[in-house]
Amino acid sequence: MTIPPETGTVDTTHADTTAVNVKKHHAADARPRDNNDPRNKPRQHGNQPRRDRRDIHGWVVLDKPIGMTSTQAVAVAKRLFQAKRAGHAGTLDPLASGGLPIALGEATKTVPFVMDGRKRYRFTVTWGEERDTDDTEGRVVQTSTSRPDVAAIRALLPQFTGRIEQTPPRYSAIKIQGERAYDLARDGEVVELQPRPVEIHELTLVDQPDADHSVFEAECGKGTYVRALARDMGRLLGCYGHISALRRTLVGPFTENDMSPLEQLEALCNRAASGEGSLADALLPVETALDDIPALAVTRADAARLHRGQAVLLRGRDAPQSSGTVYVTVAGRLLALAEIGNGELIPKRVFNLTGLTASSGRNERD
């Protein structure tokens, strides 16, 4: 496996650029920052200066409430933890609830590994209407009085399992010539996105509460749009459809057991601020995102070389015989992501975990 480029702060799972002819918006003039300009000084709330940001490293898996955007969720987490850096591992629509992994500090270097992992959703499709956003927030564009029965739905599911071609929704976070598709669509641009391959590992009908609604569970790979699944199933069934409820229950290594409701995080941060607890108790270790990658322990001398960006020769009978990506530890502490090749250990990402990290008890998850 090749280590993906470092992303730092991440705003979306779907960062692909699709070539289409659309009207470009002119960006505002970029001016150099004047550090002597009082407008560029830290903001204050009343007479209180803004609290200093801190070095804090780890993962928080927010059980995102309906109505909140992923960007808003990251901003809330960054404020609660007073973190210097934060990003998320995969956009979750405002309509959706469930797992939104938020990386703080050095955990942002491991975001691509979570984004490349599987995701599991439970969602409800309402039949009889197709909407331009493919969910309840959109404008109705097609209607039908026809409704599918259970047998017809189940017979259709194999067509949406495995590697398929899927056209993303017009209202999606995909970039088109540098702009988000949903921004262009809201501005009235005609957005024509091209189909692309996605992997759907499992798609199951789990409930049919009435003729108008069906509940599904899906496990899929990176880049899959559940809204597009509802749209395409509705078209093939001849009745149209859109998503009316959506919950993400798994993202990479993070399950529902790892999720924390926003109210719980707020309460924990308030207790920590008053000295009644520790923010470390809310964090999962940075290396949680690396569950599928082998670990390799090194000596302190080799760790010093890796920390300086220098390769380490792998010798002796204990030297690994395989090649590829490993995460490196020293004295049980995460040090780097590295590549093994030609008898060498070559550092690709070095972690500086100075500051607050997950408490030792969080290293063993339930």
Image (cartoon, rainbow, N blue to C red):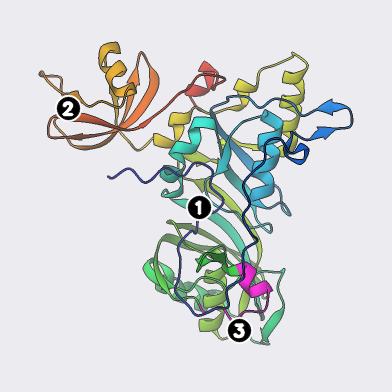
Of the numbered discs 2 and 3, the one sitting upstream in the chain is 3
Name which residue type carries label 3: Cys
Residue 321: % across, % down: 13, 31
Q: CA distance from mark 1 to mark 2?
A: 34 Å
x 41%, y 50%: residue: 116
Q: Which residue is mark 3?
A: 239
Q: Secondary structure at mark 2?
A: loop
In the rendered image, residue 250 lying in the magenta stretch gets the answer no
Q: Which residue is mark 2?
A: 320
Q: As displayed, is residue 365 above or below residue 97?
A: above
In the rendered image, residue 183 lying in the magenta stretch gets the answer yes
Q: Secondary structure at mark 3?
A: loop
Could you say which disc has been placed on residue 3 in the image? none
Of the numbered discs 3 and 1, the one sitting upstream in the chain is 1
Q: Residues within 10 Å of mark 3 (few under 14, many from 20)?
A: many
Name which residue type carries label 1: Arg
Foreground mark, 1 or 2, reads 2
Pick the front one: 192 or 288: 192
x 32%, y 42%: residue: 3
Magenta-colored span: 182-192
Could you say which disc has been placed on residue 120 in the image? 1
Of the numbered discs 1 and 2, the one sitting upstream in the chain is 1
